[in-house]
Image: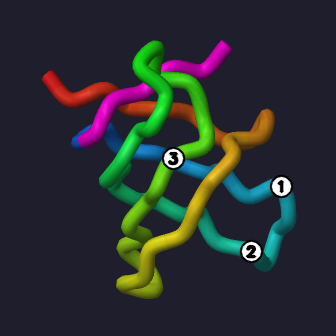
Amino acid sequence: MVKAAAGDQVVVESSHLLAHRREGKIVEVHDPDGAPPYLVHWSDTDTESLFFPGPDAHIVHRT
């Protein structure tokens, strides 16, 4: 199971040749155990959205 905390980064790799990789910062995690969904601020669009990670996503935990 994916677990994250506010401040972690989410990276979504593209499975299509012409699509780009997306990166964002997790702004809010509502589950106390760190389970999805996450409110993410996306760097490519400067917008926030509710995000449910799929198999093409991974979390980079802040240090």
Q: Residue 15: which disc?
A: 1
Category of crowding for the residue at label 2, using alpha-carbon neighbours closer than 10 angstroms: few (below 14), some (14–19), many (at least 20): few
Q: Which mark is residue 6?
A: none
* Amino acid marked by disc 2: Ala
Circle 3 sits in a helix, a strand or a loop, which is it?
Answer: strand
What residue sits right under mark 2 in the picture? Answer: 19
Residue 49: x and y in percent read 54, 69
Left or right: 56 in relation to 34: right
From the image, state whether disc 2 or disc 3 is nearer to you. 3
Q: Quadrant of residue 58?
A: top right
* Mark 3 or 1, closer to the camera: 3
- Say which element carries label 1: loop
Residue 26, above or below 17: above
What's the residue at 82%, 68% (across, down)? 17
| Residue 5, percent from left and from top | 33, 30
| Distance of label 2 from label 1 (alpha carbons) | 8 Å
Write the residue at 50% across / 20% down. Answer: 3
Q: Is residue 7 above or below residue 40?
A: above
> Which numbered disc, 3 or 1, marks the residue that appears first in the sequence?
1
Does residue 61 appear left or right of residue 42 in this picture? left
Number of residues whose C-alpha sits closer than 10 Å to that of mark 3, classed few (under 14), some (14–19) or many (20 or more): many
Stretch in magenta = 1-6
Give the position of the N terminus as an image quadrant. top right
**Which of the pair 5/22 is nearer the observer?**
5
Q: Which residue is mark 3?
A: 38
- Label 2 vs label 3: CA separation? 22 Å
Q: Quadrant of residue 55?
A: top right
Residue 34 percent across, percent down from the top left: 46, 22
Give the left or right position of residue 34, taking residue 16 as reference.
left
Q: Residue at x 85, y 65 (%)?
A: 16
